[in-house]
Amino acid sequence: MTHPLVRQPGVIPLWLWNGTEPGVTSWFQPIVDLRDGEIIGYEVLSRGQGSLESPHELFTHARTSGYTWELERACWTSALRSISRFPEELRHAPFFFNVSPDVLSDPRFGDGSTLELLELHGLGPRHLVLEITEKAVIEDGALLQRLTRECSAQGFGLALDDFGAGHSGLVTLVHCLPRFIKLDQALVRDIHLHDYRQHLVKSLVAFASSVDAILIAEGVETWEEMTVLLRLGIRHAQGYLLARPSPLPKRPSESFEARRREAMRALLLREHADDTTVGGLVIRRTTVEASTSLDEVKKHFHDAPQVDHVVMMDGARPKSLVTRRGLAAWAQGSAPLELPLIVEDQMAVTALVELAMSRATEAVYDPVVVTDAQGVFLGTVTMKQVLLRASELAVRHGSK
């Protein structure tokens, strides 16, 4: 019979241990490669009992009670026991374990007991990825660097969790050099409605590729989010849309898989097309229904200073465009809505430059609305984007 590796003096509360039984249960959520539908690992999620069922309540209570280390060990014990009972094909998939920096820096983490616990259940460091959360970082960068290097040397994988949720993510990123970078769900939530976030994620995709890291979008819940993430270059994801956490690891449903294949076919058709087309520049912008009042539109602009235009929609199709300049004219009772230039995503960038520049002088630099072949709204491109890409293409062709 195994015994809890706990060092806290006195009686251990039942919400932590009941004899040799951990007071937590373990659930597992798949992390999926969206290109082929394969699972690259499972995140381990812990649940407490009663009023402490919520992970947030559970870990907050442990921290305020001085039982952070003991709770972490209970979570590990529960998870490793579960994993050891899985079928062979599941048992050796990488499992992502959240590890708070204060536990990572605790001498008991590196005293050999963690490796002993793994060995007891027939597992080793190569089966685990340690997720270091950005929400609570080690202030001493040199210490963090040393600890993560020691973990890597032992064979553990490393991930930076909640990237984008705090203020020191870049510093943590530099010090721990993770193999996996997990985008916080705050960046993912409703990303199809926030062009600023889209630009940020697109730049992070390029960064991750340049350092050979795997970028994972957490908390994906809708197909609108998924579609935009795919267009931005996100290849790996987890969230309720794919599969909810469960006591036994499971794959996404057949209905999800069918729709994923459909989305990937559409994406690959775009990727295999000539990269000189407009589709590669599209960013999903803020939209409102065509019936939205002037006051409501003004509120959109007021609440989001970075937004310079809004597309008004008739269902899935674009109807009109409101820029900040146009909003002023609308408020004065003239030219309430601008008729935008609408093009298909397969139009060549060079053709769009010529077409856009033929507009009326006051509209030459207005954004261009982009749809698919069926007229369904995809997003917009700014003339700055179009002109920069046209310049890149001119340089590329001139060097051949």
Image (cartoon, rainbow, N blue to C red):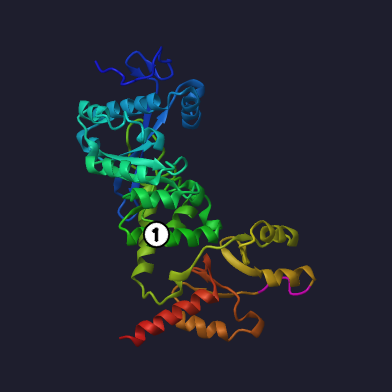
Q: Compare residues 304 and 276 and report the one nearer the observer.
A: 304
Report the side of 200 relative to 104 (left or right). right
Query: Do we see residue 111 in this rendering?
Result: yes
Q: Quadrant of the N terminus?
A: top left
The percent coordinates of residue 113 (x first, y second) are 26, 27
Percent x, y of residue 347: 45, 77
The answer, for residue 292, to whether it is visible in the render is no
Question: For this rendering, which residue is in front, 344 or 397?
Answer: 397
Q: Amino acid at mark 1?
A: Val
User: Taking 388 as reference, is 45 above or below it?
Assistant: above
Q: Which residue is label 1 attached to?
A: 205
Q: Position of residue 339 (x, y in %)?
A: 64, 74
**Element on which disc 1 rests:** helix
How many numbered tags mark residues here? 1
* The image quarter in which residue 212 lies: bottom left
Image: 290 above or below 246: below
Q: Nearer the viewer, residue 396 or 143?
A: 143
Residue at 39 percent of width and 20 percent of height: 23
Position of 87 with respect to 299 (left or right) is left
Magenta span has 152?
A: no
Q: Position of residue 303 (x, y in %)?
A: 67, 56
Q: Name the residue located 69 percent from the left edge and 72 percent from the top edge.
A: 325
Quarter of the figure with the C terminus: bottom left
Q: Please give the range of residues in magenta.
A: 334-338
Q: Residue at x 75, y 59 (%)?
A: 295
Q: Main secondary structure of the magenta part?
A: loop
Dot 1 alpha-carbon crowd within 10 angstroms: few under 14, some 14 to 19, many 20 or more: some
**Where 118 sits versus 188, above or below?**
above
